[in-house]
Amino acid sequence: MVSLESRLQAAVGDKTAGALKRAFGMETVGDLLAHYPRRYAKRGELTPIDSLPLGEQVTIVAEVRSATERRMRNRKGSILEVVISDGQGALVLTFFNQAWRANELTPGRRGIFSGKVGVYRGAQQFAHPDYQLFEDEALGRMQAQARSTEPVPIYPATSTVASWQIKKTVDTVLDMLDDVPDPLPEPFRRARGLLDARSALERTHRPETFEQIEQAHETLRTHEAFVLQAALLQQREQVRALSATSRPAAADGLLARFDAALPFALTPDQQSVGRSIASDLEGAWPMNRLVQGEVGSGKTLVALRAMLQVAETGGQAALIAPTEVLAAQHVRSMARMLGPQLAPELMPTLLTGQLSAAERRKASLRAASGQARIVVGTHALLSASTTFADLGLVVVDEQHRFGVEQRETLRAKGTAPHVLVLTATPIPRTVAMTVFGDLDVSTIRTLPAGRAGISSFVAPLAEKPGWFARVWERIAEEVAAGHQAFVVCAAIDAEAAVKDDTADEPAGPSEGAPERTRWGVVQVQELLSRHPAFENLRVAILHGRMPGDEKDAIMQSFARGDLDVLIATTVIEVGVDVPNASTMVILEADRFGVSQLHQLRGRVGRGAVPGLCLLVTEAPVGTPARERVEAVAATTDGFELAEVDLELRGEGDVLGDAQSGARSSLRLLRVVKDAELIAIARHEAERVILSDPTLADHPGLAASIDRRLDVEERAALAKN
Ligand code: ADP
Ligand code: MG
């Protein structure tokens, strides 16, 4: 007998286990049984061979009519041609240099054949199909008859391991499989009308009828949702079991002084999130909180206030940002917000890879000595040479760029520090539950008052090519009115096809978008250099291939107002703050994802100056590419757009790396479609974890969580 934890070798032998490991990274019986069929073919009612869909993978039951071997004319080797028929039409199977197959593919034998339908010299054929012959002719015929309604599982296969080979191995393993402990609490399982774990696997891999499949899948989907939520909640409880240094705010302390000097009032959301954070920081266990809010909603301010509260008791805060530009901007804006009194006391310090060796040594020293109460940096913060005297708070800006591992690396530099994660990507609730299920989530929904807001328009060049010229005039007008403008491109150099690999990858051409990028930063710069309206304007470019100090200098002079127009890739995407920038033109907007466009446009309309966003696209009306762009123009509600994004792009892309661990264990569960199930599973998992934190009374769940961690760890290792 084998269990889900058994090594595959022990169950199916070295050769098969080796092949499955190489093809799919499978190691255990559980891995194999979690390789669910991609779909199920009908065994009995056959598509007549005559009308097989060309170019599609099909499975048919047929009988061998003849097999002929011949030498190839122009090449060395032989070709075996086998004619099969289902009684209505005939099909040729071809095998190169596999003459031995003639020994088993003898006339009269029946079996299942699957492959892609092609045409060669006017006749339909399968080249190198998978097949499985019925062992015994009479029995096979009988079985075929009896099983004519039985679905044939079709597995995700590779060139080395065919679907039927997987099926055979799964059959072997299922026959040997011991009882499978159920991850679901029995009353919950019954209440949901689900199968027991063993039957769910059995009916997924060898269903007797098509009707059985859905219930089996629903059961396995529920397992995924429940096990994931239980694992996340257990993680949350593990953090809560740590004892944190309490960091209470003092009555006349740093935070109080900061608030007193603030030139504006906190928004109601900032206040309520601030209260949650303040009480987290005083709590017995480390804070582990996500704050999500639109660009410009005041998250950095919220984080800074948390840093001040931590500094009160001598603690340090480290903020990690995804880019050099952002890290530098954070330091500058924090120093500005702190003002001349508080800034020297807290000494916000920049620590990035692009500092000179001497500067970096100085910054590291300040962090290590505890002199700098606020350290802001990029990945350099994670390096072993960065240490802190008393790291009390870790702030992660734009979580979706960082994996959980990075968060943990930084956390390990303190003793159970508090953790605050900031994201400007609005996340639908169930996605947040899945990706950030171990965090408490706070949302800032309202922007500070006094924002002029932003109007967005599509410039549809497919119907109105004349608008292209108008776009540039519009920019010149804005500049004449004293404002500044961004022009965003999907590439650095369209002709040389140079992408900005340090910036966020644009979504890429989707259906309806032209194959090649037309406008790179270089092309736009060239165009504007010859444009009469731009003759006296100060135009600069910004992209990821430029040296860091140069990038920083350009961004700073744009922020100071020394430049009128900045032509850039998406390096300017997140967090960059230039209140005087009124206009953003996004060229080939259809190349960007919905959320990305929304983030980009958040760069303008941040001050008292009303923002204007022109989304330029050549995508024709009705194409998905055009719909994405129209959706962004239609609303400024980030949560609404996040939902649209999920629908249009599929969740894998949207969730990004942050979820790679979770994704490796999600097979049937879809965070959007199964939102309700996820919420139900979380509720149940919460009940279980709170009443039985060590899962002593839930061995099936404990085992499932272990298996899941094992899969995740392997996925993480494979990535490094
Ligand atoms: P985010 O990090 O969410 O993008 P920031 O914290 O950088 O937002 O805030 C954006 C701008 O708004 C900053 O210039 C900040 O000083 C300002 N700001 C923040 N909170 C308020 C508020 N309550 N009232 C007015 N302005 C605010
Ligand atoms: Mg910010």
Image (cartoon, grey):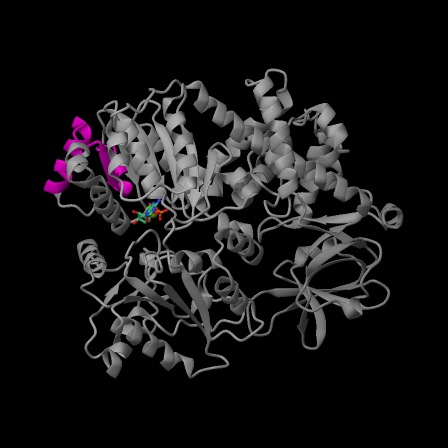
Residue 717 seen in render: no
For residue 545, what is the image quadrant?
bottom left
**View extreme (top): residue:** 696
Residue at 76% in and 28% down: 190
Residue 111, placed above or below residue 404: below
Residue 14 location, x and y as percent? 57, 35
Position of residue 419 in the picture relative to residue 109 (left or right): left
Residue 446 location, x and y as percent? 44, 47
Residue 318 location, x and y as percent? 28, 35
For residue 696, what is the image quadrant?
top right
Residue at 47% in and 58% down: 636
Quarter of the image with the N terminus is top right
Residue 601, placed above or below residue 681: below
Q: Nearer the viewer, residue 91 or 314?
A: 314
Quarter of the image with the C terminus is top left
Q: Nearer the viewer, residue 527 or 134?
A: 527
Magenta stretch containing residue 102, yes or no? no
- Magenta region: which residues? 358-385
**View extreme (left): residue:** 358
